[in-house]
Amino acid sequence: MKQQRMLKYFISALMALCVTSGFAQTNTIAVDSVRAIGDSIVYKQKYGLRIGGDVNKLVRSFVDENYKGFEINADYRIKQNLYVAGELGTEEKITDGDFFDNTTSGSYFKAGLDYNVYDNWFGMDNLIFGGIRVGLASFKQERNGFTVYNTDQYWEPFTDLSSVDFSNLSAIWAEIMFGIKVEVFNNLYVGFNAQLKNLISEDQPENFENIFIPGFNRTFDSSSIGVGFSYNISYLIPLYKKEK
Amino acid sequence: MKKILALVLFTLLTTNCERDDICPETTATTPKLIIRFYDITDQTETLRVLGLQVQGVDNEEIYQSAFSTDSLPIPLKTNDIITSYKLHKEYAEDGNGNISGNEDIINIEYSPEEVYVSRACGYKTIFNNVELTVVEDDDNWIKLIQIEDPLTVDNETAAHVKIFH
């Protein structure tokens, strides 16, 4: 039994290390051996609400003076491999560009599904998942000043130091997500995921644009694509157990 | 699923050093005022101004020293509503510091407007209701000015003002 637990931790650690390099293989031989020991044992899996927070945003809030962010995330298992999932967060980002300064602040909500593709060993509850989300952000931008861009430097460029508010902005996007969640202690999970987003609609501020959208991250001139990373710690509140 | 992972990773890697962060030269930003010189006797023909020196009034720096051209792009002040230039024709200076030639001063008045371009280029200024006048002196080499009314300078694709001499 002790050896098995050792193996569990070993696999968990290995998974955490090797996500980017490839998928962990499902070891059918090992599963068979576990079945051989406990032939009549029926393992019931935990179903419940998992609630966590984004560590990355929290750490960045302390080390990056131009950023403040906070996110809580949750998922609820509805089927063997399917989870309803969502994130709720708030962000403030100062973009100190060459020609303008901008502060975006606001909150966002994302909702969708996670699908676990990982075949767990007996007694384990880890996830390698793909997810889809729809994101919605409500925010404001504050342009703190700008300098006119001019390729010719013969005259001093015009600089506007006044602060202008563009409030009541909103944006909607779709995203796909890929990540892992590993149970490191009983009911405690650490996870990582990467997100690829595509902006569906946004309110454009007059004579300006959305530089940063909470939850979506920075925007790009040439496309409607956005990207994101998340490292999170979460806790599973087990509500009931169910056979596979 | 592996394809999605590859796509996500690829996008993350390539977007870190996006070309979006540098304003491309092909993007139209603050335009210059383009003056074209024409022949006063045959008004359909362009005529080069010889030895033209261009300097902004209240700017110590010479914008362009004596050169011959029939087309002159000049930058306008984006932080003012008027820009004045000294257009010195047949500019020459002898060993004793005596300057010869004929200097005319032009005043360009306008209403500047700041227009957002992109996150890499920020804002540009376009110039509305542009008017160009010559300060009269005893011997103006600029004989006639032809300008659209009202004139908006928001690009550099064609000349904005015709000066006949």
Image (spheres, coloured by chain):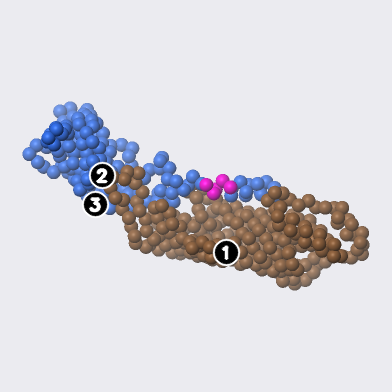
Crowding at mark 2 (Cα within 10 Å: few <14, some 14-19, many 20+):
some
Mark 3 or mark 2, earlier in chain: 3
- Tell me the magenta residue range: B13-17
Mark nearest the camera among 3 and 2 is 3
The residue that label 3 is drawn on is B81
Residue A71: image tag:
none
The residue that label 1 is drawn on is A59
Q: What residue type is labelled 3?
A: Ile
Q: What residue type is labelled 1?
A: Val
Q: Is mark 3 on a helix, strand or loop?
A: loop
Q: Residue at x 40, y 63 (%)?
A: A165
Image quadrant assignment for residue A39: bottom right
**Chain B shade in the render:** blue
The residue that label 2 is drawn on is B151
**Chain A shade in the render:** brown
What is the CA distance from the residue labelled 2 to the residue labelled 1? 54 Å
Q: Is residue B148 magenta?
A: no
Residue A45: x %, y % from top left: 80, 65
Which residue of the protein is positioned furthest toward the left in this rendering?
B138
Q: Which residue is drawn at 68% across and 51% down?
A: A20
